[in-house]
């Protein structure tokens, strides 16, 4: 049951954490979350420890290799994509951000204030 | 095993996993803001390193030779592929990485089932059901992603491939998979491995058949959806293995990926079920493909285009995938610089799905040092189109097709477009009149105020820049 609770809470965190993403960051963000599900490589590490025959060894090794590609490739490619943006002068992206999130910021700001005074 | 220190499920492991998943959450959160995205990616990568290191210290981890081999091969492939890949090929790269992740999940679930059979004890349903779920979804994701990769890489036709009765076949496969899974669950004291392998194969077929009929233009949404599914499959594998890190990280990807998918589909004015079940162009408009060559159009050279641009007050550049393929972003930037030297106001109109993925074109133009404030979003630039002197369409096609607005029977009807035909003059730089990704003819090419400049995007931009300099 604890695992179900964790699952449901994690789902909500995922929904909350990515709302209001500028289009510019859709591809890098998809790539980053893609790298994160490479965590399944841990499963490969666990099952290969249980293996005592050739077929399971092969399955486990391929699973670990696949998972590692997912992790290493995913994070590196995301870093390369984002590297394209960081060479830019700072003010411009801030402007884009501002225009997109201004109403949101105002909202959060006010709700925070309310929360603080309550 | 000297390295085996931690008991799986112990407090130390839970604490270390907690650190890892908190870093994932922070990483994704920072990934949603341009200024922090790069750091966010690093933070998530550190979280991953902690999760992997923790697991390597588990009591019971064995087969070190194979573990090292798997990690070495995976790292080498991942590093080399990531360094070599062109920015233009990024979407298919993500598809491929997503596919191997799904493949890993399917293989792990198979190995788990084999282990349970070996021990000979009944598999409790709260383990078996997650195993089956991750097997099916992992397999669908692996094959579906591979097809998406092949389509984006032009290894197979990007146009929708339809087989008659396909919906029925897919439905039968799905029913078969569910029936087999129910059978395995009922016989959970001795589940048949043959049936399980049958499930893997049926899921592989389903992955192929679901993605094959989807047109190339819808592929980003499909990849994003498969990404979310792979996350859920990883979470399911976490349930089977009682591994909290897998559950949280997988679920995080599942839910955030679902939102991202919906955002992409909205940007294209298409619904996810529509993409999955209708294919692109479910009702092919008569004469939509072919026959286009006979229609009259106006063809111009680089000099005419240069004159039109140099004496304009405002120019909007509409970049598309063709620009990316030709690696023309730097040449286009130089052309824009020449225009700006003459006092022309130059902006770039970025369609939400320009390139082959949302945000893809922004990455490519950022690579060419185009300032952010010049990149204008579709909704922002469309009202300015009637006041624009010249719209230059470079390697874009479907996203400018007025048929999306005017022709309710068009396969792309309702898709939001950049309304270049509203501009006083339109210059389209394109290699031929051939249809774009959606496989349909573009009425824009035949409009009165449109001039076609048949050339490679990079060569054309360089020639126009040179001509402007000489004016």
Image (cartoon, coloured by chain):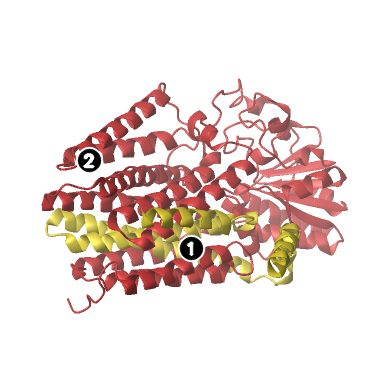
Chain colours: A yellow, B red
Q: Quadrant of the N terminus of chain B?
A: bottom left
Q: Tell me the number on the disc at residue B196.
A: 2
Give the spatial CA distance, label 2 vs label 1.
Answer: 35 Å
Using the rendered image of the protein, determine whether residue A70 is visible from the camera's viewpoint: yes
Res B207 quadrant in image: top left
Are the residues under badges 2 and 1 in a single subunit?
A: no
Q: Position of residue A110 (x, y in %)?
A: 74, 63
Chain ID at mark 1? A
Q: Position of residue B73 (x, y in %)?
A: 30, 64
| Element at label 1 | helix
Q: Quadrant of the C terminus of chain B?
A: bottom right
Q: Position of residue B454 (x, y in %)?
A: 67, 42
Name which residue lies at 60% across and 20% down. Answer: B286
List the residue tagged with mark 1. A77
Identify which residue, B42 or B280, lies in the foreground.
Answer: B42
Q: Position of residue A21 (x, y in %)?
A: 62, 56
- The answer to whether B323 is drawn above or below residue B212 in the figure is below
Number of other residues with Cα within 10 Å of mark 2, as a class: few under 14, some 14 to 19, many 20 or more = many
Identify which residue, B25 or B75, lies in the foreground.
Answer: B25
Q: Tell me the number on the disc at residue B190.
A: none
- The answer to whether B363 is drawn above or below residue B304 in the figure is below
């Amino acid at each position: 049951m604890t695992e179900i609770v964790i699952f449901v809470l994690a789902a909500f965190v995922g929904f909350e954490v990515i709302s209001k993403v500028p289009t510019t960051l859709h591809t890098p963000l998809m790539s980053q979350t893609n790298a994160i599900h490479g965590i399944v490589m841990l499963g490969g590490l666990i099952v290969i420890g249980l293996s005592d025959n050739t077929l399971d060894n092969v399955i486990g090794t391929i699973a670990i290799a696949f998972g590692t590609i997912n992790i290493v490739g995913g994070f590196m490619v995301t870093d390369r994509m984002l590297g394209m943006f960081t060479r830019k002068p700072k003010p411009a992206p801030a402007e884009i951000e501002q225009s997109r999130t201004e109403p949101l910021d105002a909202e959060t700001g006010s709700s925070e204030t309310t929360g603080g005074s309550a | 095993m000297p390295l085996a220190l931690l008991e799986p499920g112990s407090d130390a492991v839970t604490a270390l996993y907690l650190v890892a998943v908190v870093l994932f959450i922070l990483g994704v959160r920072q990934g949603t803001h341009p200024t922090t995205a790069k750091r966010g990616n690093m933070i998530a990568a550190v979280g991953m390193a902690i999760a992997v290191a923790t697991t390597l210290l588990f009591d019971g981890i064995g087969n070190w030779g194979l573990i090292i081999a798997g990690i070495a091969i995976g790292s080498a492939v991942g590093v080399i592929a990531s360094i070599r890949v062109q920015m233009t090929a990024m979407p298919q790269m993500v598809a491929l990485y997503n596919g191997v992740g799904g493949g890993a999940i399917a293989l792990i679930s198979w190995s788990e089932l084999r282990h349970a059979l070996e021990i000979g004890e009944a598999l409790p349903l709260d383990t078996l059901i997650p195993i089956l779920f991750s097997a099916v979804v992992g397999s669908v994701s692996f094959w579906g992603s591979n097809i998406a990769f092949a389509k984006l890489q032009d290894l197979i036709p990007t146009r929708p491939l339809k087989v008659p009765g396909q919906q029925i076949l897919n439905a039968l496969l799905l029913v078969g998979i569910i029936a087999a899974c129910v059978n395995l669950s009922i016989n959970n004291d001795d589940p048949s491995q043959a049936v399980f392998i049958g499930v893997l194969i049926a899921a592989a077929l389903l992955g192929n058949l679901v993605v094959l009929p989807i047109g190339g233009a819808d592929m980003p949404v499909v990849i994003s959806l498969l990404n979310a599914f792979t996350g859920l499959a990883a979470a399911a594998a976490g349930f089977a293995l009682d591994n909290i890190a897998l559950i949280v990280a997988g679920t995080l990807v599942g839910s955030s990926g679902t939102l991202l998918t919906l955002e992409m589909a909205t940007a294209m004015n298409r619904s996810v079920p529509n993409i999955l079940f209708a294919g692109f162009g479910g009702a092919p408009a008569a004469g939509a493909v072919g026959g286009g060559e006979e229609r009259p159009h106006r063809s111009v050279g680089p000099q005419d285009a240069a004159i039109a641009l140099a004496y304009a007050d405002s120019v909007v550049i509409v970049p598309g995938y063709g620009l990316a393929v030709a690696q023309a972003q730097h040449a286009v930037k130089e052309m824009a610089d020449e225009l700006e030297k003459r006092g022309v106001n130059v902006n770039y109109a970025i369609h939400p799905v320009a390139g082959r993925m949302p945000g893809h074109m922004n990455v490519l133009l950022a690579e060419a040092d185009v300032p952010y404030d010049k990149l204008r979003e579709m909704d922002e630039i469309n009202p300015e189109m009637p006041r624009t002197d010249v719209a230059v369409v470079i390697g874009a096609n479907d996203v400018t097709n007025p048929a999306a607005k005017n022709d309710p029977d068009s396969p792309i009807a309702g898709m939001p477009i950049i309304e270049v035909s509203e501009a006083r003059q339109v210059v389209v730089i394109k290699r031929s009149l051939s249809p774009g990704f959606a496989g349909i003819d573009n009425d824009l090419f035949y409009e009165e105020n449109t001039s076609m400049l048949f050339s490679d995007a990079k060569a054309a931009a360089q020639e126009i820049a040179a001509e402007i300099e000489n004016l």
